[in-house]
Amino acid sequence: MNVQVETPEALDIDDGGSLGFRSGVIRILGSWRLAGIAIPFLILFITLSVWSGPFLSKTNLINILDQQSATLAIAAAGTLVLVAGGLDLSVGAIYGLATVVSGEVAEHHAAWIAIAAALLVGLGVGLVNGMIVAFLKINPLIATLAMSFVISGVALRVSSGNLIVLSQNSAFYTFANAQLWSVPSAVWIVLIFVVILSLLLAKTSFGRYVVASGGNAEAARLAGVRVNQIRIITFALSGLAAGLGGVIDTSRLLSAQSTGGGPSLTFTVLAGIVVGGTSIAGGEGSVPRTTIGVLFIALIGNGINLLNINELYQQIVLGIILLLAVSIDVWARKRRR
Amino acid sequence: MSTENFDEAPRSAATSSGGDLVVTGVSKRYGGVPALSDVSLTITPGTVHALVGENGAGKSTLGKIISGVIAPDEGTMTLGGEHLSFKSPREALAHGIVTIVQELAIVPGLTVAENVYLGVEATTVGFVRRRESRRRFRELAKTVGFALSPDRRAGSLSIADQQKVEIMRALARNASIVVMDEPTAALSGNETAALHEIIRSLVRDGKSVVLISHFLSEVLALADVITTLRDGHLIRTVDAKDANEESLIEGMLGHSLLTAFPEKAAADEERAVVLEVEHLKALGVNDCSFVLHESEILGIAGLVGAGRSELARAIFRDSKVFGGIVRLKGGDLNGHSPSRSIHRGLVFIPESRKEMGLLVGRSVKENISLSRLDLVSRLGWISGIRERRKVTELMSAVTVKAASIRMPVSMLSGGNQQKLMFARSVMCSPSVLIADEPTRGVDVGSKRAIYDLLTEMAASGMGVVVISSDLEEVLGLAHRVLVMRHGRIITELSGERMNEQAVLAAAFTESSNEGTG
């Protein structure tokens, strides 16, 4: 057979034409994921503003953010875990442990010690999670589920099953409740945390490695990415975020209970991430989208409250939205292949 | 013979075995690349019909078409005059045609007996009659002479025993034509002999066996008729009596499509050694030693499964190494991760770029810069401008064609994807590059471009190792060729002795029993 000598021009025209069209499709698909959550969010926001007078008040909006601060922080870090190909079902339990640890410590010690204790506990448990998943090669779903039982047990032991109530006059209270431009510090702290994680995922080599580890672990490893190390760090960040969320809420509410977070927090976080369009299969995701996803779910709850709709509908609506979000992800993946 | 009827077993038509299986003008293409072109042959009952050829000659494709695993694009098959058109292996099975494939298809969680009768269980209104199955199993085991416990979990068996399960499964379906693809590749000497005896007894019973094998001695010992394939074409079908190893190898070689290769730079033994491998042992690698010089292209040839990729991955420290030393530019490469190897200056392009090389859904840019993000970032922060500049520069150097560096690599052609892997490697500026099957699934034009790349990289001082199943490619590019078999480096060829005949002789000829067990 003869080697066919193709003229470069012919090749270029052929490739250029088809590739141009396809890359256009891709650009639309890429921004499409952001639009997929941003547009429904805006529609919901405008609808609620029109329907319910109290919704658009400054108090209500700040209140929503304040209430969601812990969830937002945990979901931001959870996004990294999911993108790296993991899953952390223990965040609710870590949150619970962090609340009782910070509560117990705050009763007797300085505020900063209580805060540091909660963060360290979260980080430590997250590291253990990561190492179990990376070195023992246990499926992250099972590993973190099992760990959540262990952590909840420890939390119950720490608080002896009691509700810890703190006095309002402590420095510990100001940690989450100090006001800056009439926005509580809880919101500011979480805002900074979320921005850092967004940049970490989108702009740094660590972020690239996270994406690579979740997208194709084998290829990432052969390209020189330390996949285990990357995954451990994402779990550690997730634990740290749960610790942060726990201490913020303890400070905000001045009370702590070992059952504070639990599965319901874990699933709210996961729902927020998935509604934000981060793929459960890993290798793709964005922290800003997760933030919109979490707030979208919060708006639904808020709207149902303000409009005096029976609360049971909130769950049904949330379930349907989740299914929709996952179907869209599956559809988008098929288009890619 | 144990041919009692099962209740609703789907092999009632096995009685139609009497006739010849006639294959006429069969062709098959994979994504435009012809795997089989206009092949015709006749398989008569009571014979062993062997298919031989190089890697990728189309033997397995033909075997799969006969057994209904894949459908041909063109051509027809008839069995005893009856027209056949299989949509699935199950339909082939209904005509008494069974296949035993290279990749075993047992269900590890089921017992041996359950595996053997999977899908054709003796049942009463949907419930499996276990005792009945066991009784049948024992009879069958006696006929074939396998000592396998029916109640062991199939997953706990050795590969060889699992293969026996597959063979029994074929027999349990009362097959009249059994297609065996490399049946002895995983068997030890004794087991091979036992399997040969089974093949002979099948033939005595009037069944026919289509034997696909790399082992010419095995083929010559067993076959009645031998068909040689090359590049998807049938070269000839001969009586085994009229064939010998030389004539078979000669038929497998022929003179096929010649791609032009870039001119080789003169080999120079005086150049410094960049890679030294001494007595390396790893999974599938048995005591391998060799050296690689600066600016040298070293080819590694051998059959699929000879341990070539395993050797590469052991050198790259991607797989566990049991013993031996790898020295890169004089320093021990004793790291335990690919990441370490890359930083020391050793880069590996794996054989399947989609599974092991690329982040398919991510952009061209991200895929190229992945290994050396440190070059375009400061304190972990990626500089968008520096990354774009570097990636664009690399893309033009290796001639990757993409509409945008932001498009996902899944939209590139196979050739461009492979060039992208080279761009990533070049960015690492390694002293040694190991490329495993660098032109697999790549069009002719890109092939030439990749050959040029490999030659250029060597010319720039790099040591290059090319592993390929395409013999012409190895011979056309390399200064020296190592031939591997059963995890060992069998021979090193260079200069005059480096030709197809010599490589094939080394890769094929020894008996199938050597080195296993």
Image (cartoon, rainbow, N blue to C red):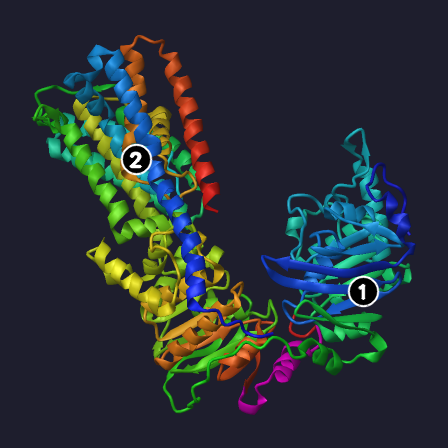
Q: Which of A145 and A52 is in front in this view?
A: A52
Residue A111 vs B277, above or below: the answer is: above
- The mark found on residue A252 in the picture is none
Tag 2's secondary structure? helix
- Is B496 inside the magenta-drawn segment? yes
Q: Tell which subunit mark 1 falls on.
A: B
Residue highlighted by disc 2: A289
Residue highlighted by disc 1: B41
The residue positioned 59% from the left and 70% from the top of the image is B306
The image quadrant that residue A290 belongs to is: top left
Residues at marks 1 and 2, CA–CA distance in whole angstroms: 61 Å
Q: What residue type is labelled 2?
A: Arg
| Left/right of residue B180 with respect to residue B225 in the rendered view | left
Q: Where is residue B59 in the image (x, y as percent from the top left)?
A: 70, 65
Q: Tell which subunit mark 2 falls on.
A: A
Of circles 1 and 2, which is in front? 1
